[in-house]
């Protein structure tokens, strides 16, 4: 809507006439009401304006306008704050304000204008979204289809219209409003005085401006002003701190700002220590990050030019990658593997073992000798002794300081320690030497024994002659010194002990004394005290201490000497120095015994190599080298490992190969990763020992590994050796070209450090290992006084900060969307909690509860929690079987299972639904060609024949763009035949006593009495029945007028609205509508309720009562799929109708006699259709079937192809006839249809019931099958597909549709030895269905499996209308006759001209195995459970009836109930047919005093709800007579496999007066 | 918490060397964005313009997003393909554009490109 015209431009205009309301408008009513309201308002306003105008007649309009203009100019010119004018302005404003206000109120009145206001108020928005644009009632029949999109558009269009109109109106309003306002404001304006505008000189103006304007000067502000107090400016940069570069600001600007800031309060806060304005460092980089690109090629923008670059292999895409910033190229680790020495090997001979031992000992010896600890310790001892002596000596000369005094015992202690150590070392030396000699001796003896040598090892013992005297002297001196020291030590100890002894003794003595004195006291003391004293004394009784012994000097000397003998070389004895040489000759192989030769050969075969593993990945391996005879392997290889990060592990694996093939892993050796200081060239060779726990037993001289052996002859002193050895290697960091060591940064956790340390030598100060130690690093940082402001140190500082604050958590992941968390509006929880979003999503996912939810509220608060409750409950209880709603636990399980199957099917379906075919999207109507046009023209010329109306093809409407109220169900009730008639007694309630008595007579006489050929008496009395039909659908009820007689003719059309569940008019939703159309036939009974005759004279007071006679149920889905239903249906009349009899009105229409005889019962002719005609969503169904077919199948591919071909051939010839070859089983697999047909055994119980008559048995079996509850697939599976369950599944589930019933019945008939086929055809009212055909005595009989009734082939009332194909267990026949009505075809399948077989000579029957079980096993009927169930149902139903009669008292007639209860089993016995009238009579007799109306209902049991519905639909409870009583009886007859037949007898009784 | 409705259509493509074009499209948004309703990606039909250069698809896009943060504003990814007479599909170009961040009706033009390929690949495109 445009803004109203500006005030000045408003000119008087004639009021525009309103545009005519659009005829197609859907918002007719609402809009009109608004419009009318508006019109009224305008009228009122106009009237008011006229009144005011007439009052203020003296002010003509032009002048007013001028006034406004003048005022405007004045206002714009006014600069001087003249008080007068100011007042005027205020007035003006107030007036304007009021105008605005008025306009607003006008707007508000209209309650809308979402376009005008950018932000509609909540109320407006709510109205906008929830307003229901109903269609105008006129455009009912001819309404063209409008897509939902269109609908919206149209709604908008209508609105736009409205707005236009309102705009006009607003204009008017505004004009009027203005008139009003100006009239009011007239008086004030007349006082305005005119004046010329004042003018000021420029200088004056400047002067004035100076008063309140401040212009900061551009001069530099002295630093002193900027600094607080007398503080000198401090320049951080000069102090060596990093400050960063300030962004450039021109000095004059800077000065201006400084001057301005200084004038401000607390302006000095803005200045830093250096007297400059605080500023962050310049964020602009020196060089541009994106360097300019210069193109080489002409004509292509340089940015778009593609440059070929060779693919780079991402080498380090793993967690070891340090980071792009620190990446310096590959680092290098040099691993030098020089060789391998086995200290033990399985191929060692005994001599080798000894040699290895000897070598080892010798190595040890050498090592010890190199260290020469003994010498060192001895020297130390000497030095200490000297020191002590000097101390003591010095102490004598001068006054010994207290420190010296103290240090002497320390020294002495030291001496003792050292001596002890030296002794130990000496002992070791000596032991080593001894063992070396011993092993050598062993070796020598071994060589002698085996008479050959394997090793070149030889031990020489070099004797070193010593000077005997000096040696002896030293020895003696040593001993003496030791002795003296020991004595001293012992003396000290003795002193200490002596001291202890004395104190102990003192204690003991005092104790003794006390003891004695106490004993004396005791004698005097009283008895009582004795105990307590004794008690406390008993505690301690110290033993008399023993004085320590004095040590003997001689003893000590002996000790020392003994020790010296053991440990030390005897004085004068030559010092032995062993020398191991490899100069010995090895005995050549020819001279060796066989075992030894074998061993040597074995050794030659063996070779060794080493693998190098970096981070447990093999990176390289050495060459394979044979083991030499001395078990040494030389590799001498250096491996250069180029790496990217700090290695996690370095490992060597030693492998041994024997001969050509087998390679065994001997051992793994971990090599320590070298320190960063270890560089190539300076790295020492290291020997790393390894050993293997492999057990090797050899058959030659080799000792093996992990095998015990002995050197002794007697086998004692066994030893076990493992394969072991030493690898000599060295690992070091390589040095690069410039001498830079190629060492990666230490590890992941210290990522930040190395870059920070590039410049500052932290490694030098704290060592490499310190880099891993946070504390050390922090300390170092503090010591070196790192500048925390320097960006170069940022990483390090942050590290240290994190480390010291204790949160040493460095995230080891990389986040893609950084700062996402920080910028979020809401938290995740809140986001996920949003009910609106959840609702939208669930709706989008087409979750059942929300699939068709319309108009999701905009605000959270408008969505109630309850909305989700059901859904959550369902999710929660999916697997919990709720037995509450099901009386039978078994059925609860079945229902649960079905629910699951349904869900899975629906999910598949939802997927299929979003799969669009071309025909779904492209809907092109054929352009009328010239021929059609010509025909049309020709038709115009045709003579009009109003008496011969032609059927017009109705336009089909696709279901999706419909809304509530668009669809109507038209039911045309034409006529009925053979409605049960009242027994005369009923029509004469005035004579009850007589009727009860004469009932039997009456009954006997009735046929004659009711014969139409009879006297006029009958005609007079003809109110036999006054039937009317009531159609109820979706709780909407429509009825016809009342007709009379048993063959009424109504010919009335009833119209019932249809409302799809959840307002979803999509195809699949319509297919799954579960509602049924109930067509109930009632009898209207009038009876006089007038009490006495005097009343009767004054007026008629009759009561209309209706009694249910029967009903026809037609599911909506059938109507939907069939588009129209036209036919005569059998009315489902209860077997017993109290007070009614099914009498045949013979002679009325003689032509039907034969028919009548065949089929007993009442019939009603109906025509049902939907307006507008809906297109059944076949495409979805087909698609689904196609999809399902794709799922999987176990059928042969050839068979499926043949089936497809067959189907295609058949449908091309007869497109209306369905050809069924494959169906889908419960698992969604495609199964060939004949597999379902197989002879099966019916329950034995049924066969035994009537062994003589096969006819009755067949009927019984059919009845049994019919008793299994009916559950159409199209309902349970949303009209998607037929799922065929096998007979055992069907019996388990106890629910299925026509196919399952038919298959089971057919199988039973086959099992009974009949010839039976499955008929696939079309029936009324089921639509496409399956029936069973049997051949009995050359007569074809058609069975309806879901009702159990049967028809002969030529039965006109057979519900089966068309026959498409026949299926037996080994073939399929397609009907290729001209007609398909069962009456007009031949069922002789042997004629290929009439029936096209699937398996023929060209494609013989392959012998398909059946999917049915071998045999059906039946559970026996559970009588007790049935009785229990019976009681429960009865209780529930009684409660329900009472519930339905909330305003009345419901009395139960026990007597009648028990009578009925007895009556029901009889009905079951007779299968509800031809109930003996005797029983009825009996009942009548027993309840003679009552007017009884009621009937039994028979149903298969599935759930309670249908039973309740059935009882409700009869309307027994609706009786309003005050003294009515009720009777209700339930009987359940159990059949095998818990198939239950339920009988409910409901009756209302009114006592006759 | 904010919501974004993207309603529009892929009108068509022009300036491609071949006719018979179709387009694969997808809306890509950051992790803060949640799809409430609508299809995030799709493919148009093949349009073979009889006259003129422009292939018209008029393919509807109707997506409803909810977001908890502005990062990752939705982008429209487009791939223009050509279907030749043998039913083979060949990429002619791809590109992307941001969904406009101001409300209202916007006409967007997205320039597409594809790598030229080596001469061998270029040669192979002829077959």
Image (cartoon, rainbow, N blue to C red):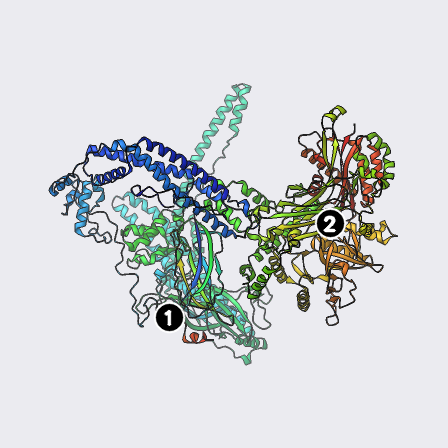
Badge 2: chain ID: A
Whether residue A1171 appears in this view of the structure is: yes
Q: Which residue is mark 1?
A: A309
Image position, residue B123 (x, y; %): 43, 76
A1273 left or right of A502? right
Image position, residue A824 (x, y; %): 40, 48
Q: Nearer the viewer, residue A839 or A252?
A: A839
Q: Residue furthest bottom?
A: A590
Image position, residue B78 (x, y; %): 43, 62
Q: Which residue is mark 2?
A: A1129
First-in-chain label (2 vs 1): 1
Whether residue A431 appears in this view of the structure is: no
Looking at the image, is mark 2 or mark 1 nearer the viewer?
Answer: 2
* Numbered circles on residues, count: 2
A1436 left or right of B59? right
Q: Nearer the viewer, residue B73 or B22?
A: B22
Measuring 67% from the left and 34% from the top, which residue is drawn there?
A1443
Badge 1: chain ID: A
Measuring 79% from the left and 64% from the top, which residue is drawn there?
A1388
Q: Nearer the viewer, residue B2 or A666?
A: B2
* The label number, if any, that marks residue A505 in the structure image: none
> Which quarter of the picture shows residue A291?
bottom left
Distance from disc 2 to disc 1, alpha carbons, whole Å, reads 84 Å
Q: Secondary structure at mark 2?
A: strand
Residue A1329 vertical position relative to residue A301 in the rendered view, above or below: above
Q: Secondary structure at mark 1?
A: loop
Q: Circles 2 and 1: CB distance less than 8 Å?
A: no
């Amino acid at each position: 809507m445009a803004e109203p015209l500006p005030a000045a431009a408003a000119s008087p205009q004639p009021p525009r006439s309103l545009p005519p309301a659009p005829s197609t408008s859907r918002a007719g009513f609402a809009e009109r009401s608004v419009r009318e309201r508006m019109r009224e308002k305008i009228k009122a306003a106009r009237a008011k304006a006229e009144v005011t105008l007439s009052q203020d007649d003296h002010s003509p309009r032009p002048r007013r306008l001028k006034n406004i203009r003048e005022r405007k100019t004045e206002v714009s010119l006014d600069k001087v704050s003249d008080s007068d004018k100011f007042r005027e302005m205020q007035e003006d404003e107030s007036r304007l304000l009021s105008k605005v206000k008025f306009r607003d109120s006008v707007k508000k009145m209209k309650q809308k204008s979402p376009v005008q206001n950018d932000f509609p108020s909540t109320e407006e928005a709510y109205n906008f979204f929830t307003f229901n644009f109903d269609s105008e009632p006129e455009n009912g029949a001819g309404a063209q289809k409008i897509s939902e999109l269109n609908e919206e558009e149209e709604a908008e269009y209508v609105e736009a219209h409205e707005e236009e109109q309102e705009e006009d109106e607003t204009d008017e309003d505004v004009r009027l409003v203005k008139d009003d306002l100006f009239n009011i404001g007239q008086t004030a304006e007349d006082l305005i005085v005119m004046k010329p505008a004042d003018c000021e000189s420029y200088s004056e103006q400047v002067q004035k401006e100076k008063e309140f304007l401040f212009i900061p000067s551009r001069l530099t502000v002295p630093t002193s002003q900027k600094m607080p107090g007398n503080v000198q400016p401090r320049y951080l940069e000069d102090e060596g701190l990093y400050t960063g570069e300030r962004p450039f600001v021109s000095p004059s600007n800077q000065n201006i700002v400084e001057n301005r800031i200084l004038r401000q309060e607390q302006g000095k806060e803005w200045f830093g220590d250096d007297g400059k304005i605080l500023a962050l460092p310049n964020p602009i980089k020196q060089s541009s990050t994106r360097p300019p690109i210069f193109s080489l090629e002409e004509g292509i923008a340089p940015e778009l030019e593609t440059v070929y670059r060779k693919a780079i292999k991402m080498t380090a895409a793993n967690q070891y990658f340090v980071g792009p910033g620190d990446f310096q190229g590959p680092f290098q680790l040099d691993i030098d593997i020089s060789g391998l020495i086995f200290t033990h090997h399985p191929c060692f001979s005994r001599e080798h073992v000894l040699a290895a031992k000897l070598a080892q000992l010798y190595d040890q010896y050498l090592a010890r000798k190199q260290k020469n600890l003994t010498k060192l310790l001895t020297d130390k001892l000497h030095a200490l002794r000297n020191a002590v002596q000097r101390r003591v000596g010095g102490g004598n000369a001068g006054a010994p300081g207290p420190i010296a005094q103290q240090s002497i015992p320390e020294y002495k202690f030291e001496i003792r320690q050292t001596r002890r150590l030296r002794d130990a070392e000496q002992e070791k030396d000596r032991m080593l030497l001894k063992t070396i000699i011993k092993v050598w001796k062993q070796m020598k003896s071994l060589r002698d024994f085996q008479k050959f040598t394997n090793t070149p090892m030889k031990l020489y013992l070099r004797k070193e002659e010593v000077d005997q005297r000096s040696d002896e002297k030293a020895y003696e001196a040593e001993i003496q010194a030791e002795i003296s020291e020991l004595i001293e030590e012992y003396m000290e100890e003795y002193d200490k002990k002596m001291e202890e002894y004395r104190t102990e003794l003192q204690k003991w003595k005092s104790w003794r004394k006390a003891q004695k004195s106490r004993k004396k006291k005791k004698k005097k003391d009283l008895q009582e005290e004795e105990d307590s004293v004794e008690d406390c004394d008993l505690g301690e009784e110290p033993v008399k201490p023993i004085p320590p012994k004095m040590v003997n000097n001689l003893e000590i000397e002996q000790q020392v000497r003994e020790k010296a003998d053991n440990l030390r070389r005897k004085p004068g004895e030559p010092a032995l120095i062993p020398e191991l040489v490899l100069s010995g000759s090895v005995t050549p192989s020819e001279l060796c015994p066989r075992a030894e030769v074998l061993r040597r050969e074995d050794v030659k075969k063996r070779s060794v190599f080493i693998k190098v593993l970096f981070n447990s990945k093999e990176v390289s391996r050495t060459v394979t080298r044979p083991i030499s005879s001395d078990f040494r392997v030389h590799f001498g290889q250096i491996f250069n490992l180029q790496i990217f990060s700090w290695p996690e592990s370095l490992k060597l694996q030693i492998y041994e190969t024997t001969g050509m093939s087998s390679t065994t892993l001997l051992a793994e050796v971990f090599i320590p990763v070298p320190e960063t200081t270890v560089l190539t060239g300076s790295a020492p060779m290291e020997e790393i020992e390894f050993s293997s726990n492999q057990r090797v037993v050899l058959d030659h001289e080799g000792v093996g590994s992990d095998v015990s052996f002995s050197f002794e002859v007697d086998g004692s002193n066994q030893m076990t050796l493992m394969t072991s050895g030493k690898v000599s290697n060295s690992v070091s960091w390589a040095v690069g070209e410039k001498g830079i060591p190629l060492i990666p940064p230490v590890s992941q956790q210290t990522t930040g450090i190395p870059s920070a340390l590039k410049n500052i030598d932290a490694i030098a100060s704290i060592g490499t290992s310190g880099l891993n130690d946070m504390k050390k690093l922090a300390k170092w940082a503090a010591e070196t006084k790192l500048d925390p402001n320097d960006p170069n140190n940022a990483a390090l500082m942050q590290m240290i900060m994190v480390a010291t604050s204790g949160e040493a958590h460095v995230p080891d992941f990389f986040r893609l969307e950084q700062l996402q968390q920080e910028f979020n509006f809401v938290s995740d929880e809140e986001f996920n909690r949003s009910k609106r979003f959840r609702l939208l999503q669930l709706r989008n996912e087409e979750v059942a509860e929300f699939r068709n939810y319309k108009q999701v509220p905009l605000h959270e608060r408008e969505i109630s929690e309850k909305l989700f409750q059901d859904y959550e409950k369902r999710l929660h209880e999916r697997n919990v079987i709720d037995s509450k709603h099901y009386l039978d636990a078994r059925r609860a399980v079945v229902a649960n299972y079905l629910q699951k199957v349904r869900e899975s099917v629906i999910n598949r379906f939802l997927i299929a639904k979003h799969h669009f075919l071309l025909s779904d999207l492209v809907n092109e109507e054929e352009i009328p060609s010239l021929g059609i046009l010509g025909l049309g023209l020709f038709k115009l010329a045709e003579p009009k024949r109003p008496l011969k109306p032609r059927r017009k093809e109705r336009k089909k409407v696709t279901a999706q763009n419909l809304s509530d109220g668009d669809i109507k169900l038209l039911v045309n009730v034409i006529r009925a035949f053979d409605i049960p008639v009242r027994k005369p007694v009923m029509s004469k309630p005035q004579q009850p006593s007589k009727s009860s008595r004469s009932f039997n007579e009456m009954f006997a006489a009735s046929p004659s009495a009711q014969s139409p050929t009879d006297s006029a008496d009958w005609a007079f009395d003809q109110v036999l029945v006054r039937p009317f039909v009531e159609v109820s659908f979706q709780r909407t009820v429509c009825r016809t007028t009342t007709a009379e007689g048993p063959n009424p003719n109504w010919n009335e059309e009833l119209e019932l609205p249809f409302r799809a569940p959840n307002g979803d008019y999509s195809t699949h939703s319509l297919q799954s509508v579960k509602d049924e159309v109930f067509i109930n036939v009632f009898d209207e009974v009038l009876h006089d309720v007038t009490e006495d005759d005097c009343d009767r004279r004054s007026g008629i007071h009759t009561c209309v009562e209706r009694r249910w006679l029967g009903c026809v149920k037609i599911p909506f889905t059938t109507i939907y799929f069939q588009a129209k239903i036209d036919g005569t249906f059998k009315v489902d009349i209860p077997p017993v109708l109290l007070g009614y009899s099914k009498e045949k009105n013979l002679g009325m229409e003689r032509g039907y006699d034969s028919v009548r005889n065949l089929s007993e019962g009442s019939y009603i002719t109906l025509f049902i259709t939907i307006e507008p005609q809906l297109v059944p969503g076949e495409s979805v169904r087909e698609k689904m079937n196609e999809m399902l077919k794709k799922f999987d199948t176990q059928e042969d591919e050839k068979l499926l192809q043949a089936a497809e071909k067959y189907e295609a051939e058949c449908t091309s010839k007869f497109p209306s006839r369905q050809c069924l070859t494959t169906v889908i089983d419960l698992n969604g697999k495609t199964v060939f249809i004949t597999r379902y047909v197989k002879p099966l055994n019916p329950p034995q119980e049924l066969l035994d019931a009537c062994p003589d008559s096969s006819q009755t048995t067949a009927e019984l079996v059919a009845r049994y099958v019919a008793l299994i509850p009916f559950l159409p697939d199209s309902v349970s599976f949303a009209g998607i597909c037929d799922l065929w369950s096998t007979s055992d599944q069907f019996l388990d589930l106890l629910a299925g549709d026509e196919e399952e019933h038919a298959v089971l019945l057919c199988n039973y008939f086959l099992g009974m030895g009949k010839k039976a086929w499955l008929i696939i055809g079309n029936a009324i009212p089921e639509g496409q269905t399956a029936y069973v055909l049997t051949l009995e005595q050359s007569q074809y009989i058609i069975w309806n499996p879901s009702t159990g009734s049967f028809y002969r082939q030529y039965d006109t009332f057979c519900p089966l209308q068309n026959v498409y194909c026949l299926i037996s267990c080994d073939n399929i026949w397609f009907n290729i006759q001209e007609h398909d009505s069962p009456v007009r075809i031949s069922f002789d399948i042997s004629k290929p001209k009439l029936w096209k077989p699937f398996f023929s000579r060209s494609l013989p029957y392959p012998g398909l195995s059946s999917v049915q079980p071998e045999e059906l096993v039946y559970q026996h009927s559970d009588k007790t459970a049935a009785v229990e169930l019976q009681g429960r149902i009865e209780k529930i139903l009684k409660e329900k009836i009472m519930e339905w009669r909330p305003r009345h008292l419901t009395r139960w007639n026990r007597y009648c109930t028990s009578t009925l209860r007895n009556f029901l089993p009889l009905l079951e016995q007779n299968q509800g047919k031809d109930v003996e009238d005797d029983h009825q009579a009996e009942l009548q007799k027993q309840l003679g005093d009552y007017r009884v109306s009621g009937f039994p209902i028979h149903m298969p049991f599935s759930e309670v709800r249908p039973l309740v519905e059935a009882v409700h639909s009869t309307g027994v409870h609706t009786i309003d007579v005050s003294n009515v009583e009720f009777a209700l009886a339930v009987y359940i007859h159990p059949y095998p496999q818990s198939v239950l037949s339920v009988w409910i007898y409901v009756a209302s009784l009114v006592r006759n007066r | 918490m904010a919501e974004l409705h993207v309603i529009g259509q892929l009108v068509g493509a022009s300036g491609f060397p071949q006719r018979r074009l179709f387009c694969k499209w997808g809306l890509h948004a950051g992790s803060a964005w949640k799809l409430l309703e609508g299809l995030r990606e799709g493919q148009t039909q093949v349009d073979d313009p009889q006259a003129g250069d422009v292939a018209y698809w008029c393919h509807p896009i109707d997506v409803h997003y909810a977001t908890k943060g502005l990062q990752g504003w939705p982008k429209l990814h487009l791939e223009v393909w050509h279907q030749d007479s043998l039913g083979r599909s060949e990429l002619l170009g791809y590109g992307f554009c941001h969904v406009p961040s101001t409300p209202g009706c916007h006409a967007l033009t997205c320039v597409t490109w594809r790598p030229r390929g080596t001469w061998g690949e270029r040669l192979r495109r002829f077959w």
